Amino acid sequence: MLTLSPCAPRGGGKRLLVAEGSQCVERIHKLDLEQEKKYFIMLVLFETAAGYAIFKVLDEQKLQQVDSLWKEFETPEKANKVVKLKHFEKFQDTTEALAAATAMVEGKLGKSLKKVLKKIVAKEAHEQLAITDAKLGGVIKEKLNLSCVHSPAVAELMRGIRNQMEGLITGLPAREISAMSLGLAHSLSRYKLKFSPDKVDTMIVQAISLLDDLDKELNNYIMRCREWYGWHFPEIGKIVTDNLVYCKTVRKIGDRTNVATTDLSEVIPEEIEAEVKLAAEISMGTEVSEEDIANIMHLCDQVIEISEYRTQLYDYLKNRMMAIAPNLTVMVGELVGARLISHAGSLLNLAKHPASTVQILGAEKALFRALKTRRDTPKYGLIYHASLVGQTTAKNKGKISRMLAAKTSLAIRYDALGEDTNSEMGIENRAKLEVRLRYLEEKGIRRISGSGKALARADKYQHKSDVKVYDPSGDSTLPTTSKKRKIEEVEEGDEEEKPIEAKAKKVKREAPAEGEAETETPKKKKKKEKKAEETTAAVPAEMPKKKKEKKRAAEEEPKEELEEAAVSPVEETKEKKKKKKKVKEDE
């Protein structure tokens, strides 16, 4: 049975052991000495941009004084009394340095570090290894079976070594160390940010912004040039329509009096040149001074230079887009793709957006206005300017923009996060969209009967709009015509249709009466005519009021004829009796 009891502090250097048996006491005493030896012998692993350095601690008692340890590294001479360089493993190139630094940042054991530790530290397995990263210490202990130390004293020791690195590591000039540090820092930052010089989306953002600014400035300059030179030669503005050609022509001509002697064949075609020369002879422009012409020339030079730079910038943007986002470029084009990246901030930010956001990107103002007023939300934003959306009819623009946004979001993610830099996926998706677009344009209507391959004939769509005419009758509440007058008008319309037959019958029946009264005086004839008119006016007055409508009147025609036939002989007999009485009285 063995029991241990510490009777003195560790600072005394030994423990008093009480044991049963002298042999056990001797073995424990040897183990204690070995532990003390392990504690007081320590190696330090120090990483630099040039390579790995392994230092040996000479005076380990000073490590216990953490607060005053910095005083031991005030000068290189003092630092050399605390630590001494045991081995330095230099990196061959920046790639090896980047691999080693990356492995150390991620807490992994790199190949170069593993080789150094096996070569130097493993020979002295009883020594402890001071390191800066506790995670890395666990990996070293697991793979190489080396005891590692990480404490505040070790961190202070590393800080002191870093301050006096030039004096402790011999054979490395200060310039070389600073250059290696700078190069490694740049490479490591690129690696951590997944940065590649070929995939610089910030250049695209700047290029598309500058392109838009150049377009605005060019429009302002050209408008000013046309207006300015138009005072001198206004007719040329309608003959030469292209802005760049206009500025080149003005630059070539100068004063309009020089048109006849100037050769413009390099700038414009012969037909337009003939028109310009003819217009110059009969121009209505005012005379300007040579100083004015010089300023106009200078403005034309500026327009030509900016136009050339814009063409160069567009080519640069096209190349950058094909290098960074080839699939996005195939789907929507260079300008629309660059504007989407610029609007999102970067290609990676754009890849985080869903397809619905990509579809309305650029129409945020209209979207929030629609949400606020509870109206229909916009169907497209910047993606509206893509060629696939532009070549569709207005009816199918919403469907195509939605499908294009879905495929475009896939292409963006493939470009941002994929390792390949080809455009095969974009070409394939664009072909599918074109097939779908063709199907929608043909309306996709197929016959059910027969072979089912032929398209059904669809009638052409004709827009029928109902044009509403303004009714002025609602302006006034007063009736324009009285109800009695309307009724009389309706009755007169009915009379015009049906008095012809009745008159004919009456004429036939009254014929003998006229023969009898030939001998009568003209006054009596006039009286008889008046009475006949009264009888004819009385007949339609007795007609029922229900015969106002034309349709009912047409149905009741035969009834009216019978009634007239029944009424007319009775009236005639009465008239004959009256006439006979009057004749007798006259006699």
Image (cartoon, grey):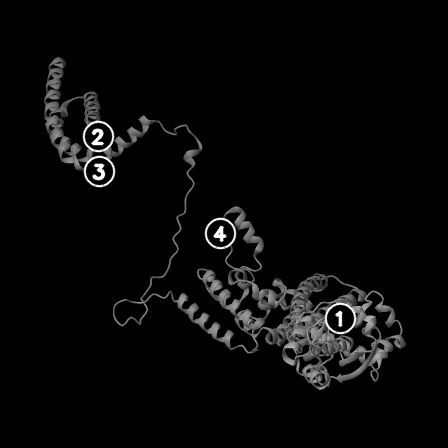
Q: CA distance from mark 4 to mark 3?
A: 52 Å
Which badge, 4 or 1, comes first in the chain's sequence? 1
Question: Is residue 264 in sight in this rendering?
Answer: no
Q: CA distance from mark 3 to mark 1?
A: 139 Å
Residue 546 is tagged as 2
According to the picture, the residue beneath numbered tag 3 turns out to be 551
Binning the other alpha carbons within 10 Å of mark 2 as few (below 14), some (14 to 19) or many (20 upward) gives: few
Vertical relation: 383 (above or below) 87: above
Image location of residue 259, percent across then percent down: 71, 72
Which of 495/90 is in front?
90
According to the picture, the residue beneath numbered tag 4 turns out to be 376
Q: Which three-letter amino acid code belongs to the residue tagged 4?
A: Asp
Q: CA distance from mark 2 to mark 4?
A: 56 Å
Q: Which three-letter amino acid code belongs to the residue tagged 3?
A: Lys
Which of the 4 image quadrants contains residue 508? top left
Q: Nearer the viewer, mark 3 or mark 1?
A: 1
